[in-house]
Amino acid sequence: MGQGGGERFDKMIINILAIIFVFGTVIIIHELGHFLVAKKAGIKVEKFSFGLGPPIFKFKKGETFYQISPFPLGGFVKLAGEYPEEAKKDSSPQEKKREYFSKPLGIRALVIVAGPLNNILLGFLIFVFVFLFGVETPDFSLAKIGTFTKNAPAEKSGLQKGDVILMIDNVKINRWEDMAEIIHKSAGEKLKFLVQRESEEFSLNITPEEKLLPAPSGKMEKIGLIGIMPATHTERVGLPLAIKKAAINTRDVTVLIFVALKKIFTKEIPAKYLAGPIGIAQLTARFAHTGLSNFLFFIALISINLGIINLFPFFILDGGRITGLGIEKITRKTPSKRLLEISQTVGIALLLALFLFITYNDLLRLFKK
């Protein structure tokens, strides 16, 4: 295998390991939330599964079976007596006390909400870690090039990492935003760049390529891009400020999720921009090569997204089960097995339809590339 083939193989292995790590981390942390709170509440946990489908590996420790299944798109924790009709008539009083439906409604709610909250907590703790030990922060104080998009106009022009853009078409550039504004409104137009490389200054021409991207308003607009990102510097802060910054980031990500969903439902952003497992895997592969802090930030974003989305009051999601508990509290009736089966079937059907739709969009993006 040649050097180029070896590098591609190494990159592929890193991508695969990164994807397994990201999916594995956020899923296991989620299910661990349900598992630990159920155990603490005295509920018997019959099964803990990472992945969906028939198990390919399993073992029993204590009273719980632990298994790995082939489809790493989810997982589950199976609790004793999770459905009222599952209760065995010949169970001892001690066994009945350890069934899910034997517990007060508040305890059951805590077991359900623990999974999503674990994901949100993981995102928060990752943010704290990154700010505490150093995060690569973009430097917008000058137009200094940090990285390139492969085969984009900037890379083809001969620009290099560390180059500083001084002028564009005789317009002085003071900050990164000055340069970006000119490039964004000049799609397809040849621009003359004055560049400083160490002690040398020289000129070159670059034509920004036209791209369709979401604007701050949420609508799609055509802008010019040359494929560059700013240089970065490492920012480290003390623990109190790291906690504060982590809390702000967690809040901002949460708000952004609701804003994005609102724009999708109002069609300000096309639904085709929703990313599913394939899209997330692609993003994971990209972030795996952008440095540890960026990769950790990405995991935090995915984990918080999973936590927030799971709290939505939809069938099959944890939020739907919490809503069911709310209905149970109002009606003072435990749901029947038939009702639970119907709601689960409807939920799975809706979730599958959404999954297929998002996967279709992911595949379209993949093949277009």
Image (tube, rainbow, N blue to C red):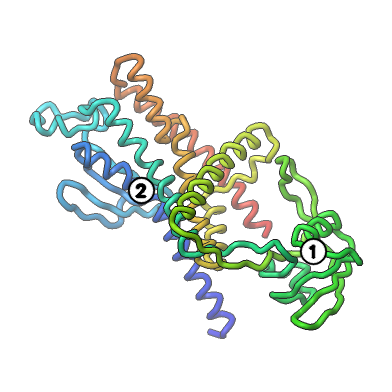
Residue depicted at x 31% and y 21%: 335
**In this view, 319 is above or below 22:** above
Name the image quarter holding the C terminus.
Answer: bottom right
Residue 283 horizontal/vertical position (percent): 56, 57
User: Mark on residue 174?
Assistant: 1
Residue 251 horizontal/vertical position (percent): 52, 42
Q: Secondary structure at mark 2?
A: loop
Residue depicted at x 46% and y 29%: 313
Residue 360 placement, left or right of 52? right
Q: Quadrant of residue 169?
A: bottom right
**In this view, 51 is above or below 104:** below
**In this view, 147 is above or below 181:** below
Of labels 1 and 2, earlier in sequence is 2
Residue depicted at x 86% and y 75%: 204
Residue depicted at x 29% and y 27%: 106
Q: Which residue is mark 2?
A: 53
Residue 303 placement, left or right of 64? right
Q: Secondary structure at mark 1?
A: loop
Q: Amino acid at mark 1?
A: Asn
User: Quick one: label 2, few (<14), some, or many (20+) residues within 10 Å?
Assistant: some
- 364 or 99, nearer to the observer: 99
Q: Amino acid at mark 2?
A: Gly
Residue 60 horizontal/vertical position (percent): 18, 52
Q: CA distance from mark 1 to mark 2?
A: 57 Å
Furthest residue to the right? Answer: 170
